[in-house]
Structures are given as C-alpha cells and as structure tokens.
Image (tube, helix red, strand yellow):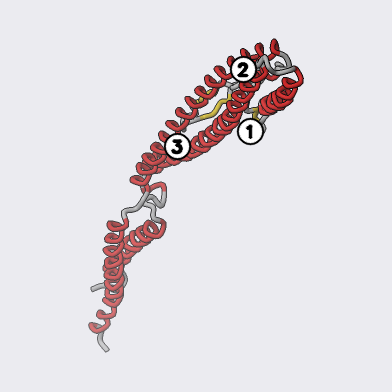
Amino acid sequence: MIISSNLAAQSAANDLTKTSAALTKSLAKLSSGSRIVNAYDDAAGVAISLRFDAKIERANAARDNVANAMSFTNTQDGYLKRISKTLNRMSELAMLSLDGTKSDSDRALYENEFTQLSSYITNVGGKEFNGVTLFSSANVSSVIDSEGTAFNMTGVDLTSTTYTNVTSSTIATTVGATSALSGIRTAITQLASDRATIGAFQSRLNMANDQLSATIENFTAASSVIKDVDVARESTEFSRQNILNQSTTAMLAQANQLPQSVLRLLPQ
C-alpha cells in the first residue's frame, strides 16, 4: 500500500468522468429527441440532414406557390363560367333581335341588355389577382418543385379581338344582330378553348402538388432516420450508463478510503 499516489482512486475518477459524459450525452439525446446533439456525433449525418432539411423547406415553399397558382386558375375559371353564361344570353338576345316580326323599338330593348352584358365582359377583362392581371396575353410563371422548375401558364386574354368584336357589336338592327351572332359563336368557341387550357394547367398543378407532398414525406422520413433518436434503445443506454455512473461513484468513494487503512500499520 502507498499513500502518495492513490492509483485506484485515479482510475475510478477517470471511469467516473467517462460514464458521466456518456450519461450526460444520453440524457441530451432523450431530452432533445435528436440522435445528433453535437456535430461530432455524426459529421456526415449532419451534412446530409441539413441538405434534406433544406430540400424539405424548399418543397414546402414550392407547395405554397402551387397553391397560389391553383387559386389563380380557379379564380380565372370562376369568371369564365360567368362569361360563358353571359355569351349564351347574348347569343339568345341576338337571335331574338333577328325575329322579323320585331320592330326596331323592340330591338332597342334587347340592345339595352346586350350592352350591359358587353360591359360586364369588358369589366371582367380588367380583373386582377393580388395585383396580377387575370386575363391578359402575358404568361404567368410559377415554381412548382424544390429544384426551382418553372411552370408557365399562357395568358387568357379577354381583351383580344375575339372578345372585343362581341363587346363592340350591336343588335339594334338585323344586320348588326347577324354580325354579332357570328362573333358570339366565335367567342364561345374561344372561351371553350380557354377553359380547356386552364383545366390542363389545373391538372398539372394538382400533379405537382401531389409530387411535392410525396417529396416532403419521403425526405422527412429520410431525415428522421438520420436525426431522430431511437427512444427505446437510448433509454436502455441511459439506464446502463446511469448504473455504471452510480457504481463508479461508489468505487471512487471506496478507493479514496483505501489510504486510510495504511494508518492502521503505523505505530501508535
């Protein structure tokens, strides 16, 4: 036995330091829910998870863009549904005005309603969505995935000659009604094409939204595998380290008492 150097106590103290560090680390994982508390826990995992997290955030932002684009096209289609009803009514008025048993004063009454409906179409042509014109020849571009892919939606132009020929026509005379009816039929055909185009955009946007949802789900799962702690396994590790810590603490106390036994060898 020696007094000047208590090697048993030093060894126990070193073991206690290690078990205390392991216990603290395990506790940090359980309390945070993350397997990677510090970068040195898994440097490669940190780098990968950061890239995954960034991709998830971009995908969430892209999904917001897609939702806004869907709102834009839904608003367009909502107006075009009413334009369709308006053109149908205008075609009906034109047909009524072509009735040879009607006088010009009768046609003037039809013309009043026809003019109001024309004004409605003109008014809709100037509508906006969050400051962006709903119906113009300009394309509307939106980013629809986490990699920045742009999706261009061609403009639906209610100020084109196809529609302005209708809004500037008259049914006050049979000649005018004949010309107006021809223009309305052309506008109805164009309107059907415009709505079909919007429908195609909506279909593409729905698919993009589904893809983004799948991307977010898959990368969230992948990131979880890297970052999230396995509570069952870590709880077992925490219990193990806690037992070792208590045991090492007891052994250190015993080691510190060993030199005192040397005193019994000394003469009194």
Q: Amino acid at mark 2?
A: Ile
Between residue 226 and residue 94, name the one nearer to us: 94
On the image, numbered disc 1 is attached to which residue? 129
Callout 3: SS: helix
Between residue 59 and residue 158, name the one nearer to us: 158
Q: Which numbered disc, 3 or 2, marks the residue closer to the eye?
A: 2
Q: Residue at x 39, y 47 (%)?
A: 40
On the image, numbered disc 3 is attached to which residue? 55
Q: CA distance from mark 3 to mark 2?
A: 49 Å
Q: Earlier in the sequence, mark 3 or mark 2?
A: 3
Q: Amino acid at mark 3?
A: Lys
Dividing the picture into quadrants, the one containing residue 208 is top left
Q: CA distance from mark 3 to mark 1?
A: 29 Å
Measured from the top left, where is residue 89 in percent x and y?
62, 25
Measured from the top left, where is residue 22 in percent x and y?
33, 59
Measured from the top left, where is residue 155 in percent x and y?
59, 22
Q: Amino acid at mark 1?
A: Phe
On the image, numbered disc 2 is attached to which residue? 184
Instruction: Characterize the local packing of mark 2: few (<14), some (14-19) or many (20 or more) Cα atoms within 10 angstroms.
Output: many
Whether pointer 2 and pointer 1 mark residues with C-beta atoms closer than 8 Å, the reply is no
Instruction: Characterize the local packing of mark 3: few (<14), some (14-19) or many (20 or more) Cα atoms within 10 angstroms.
Output: some
Measured from the top left, where is residue 261 in percent x and y?
25, 80
Q: Residue at x 64, y 35 (%)?
A: 130
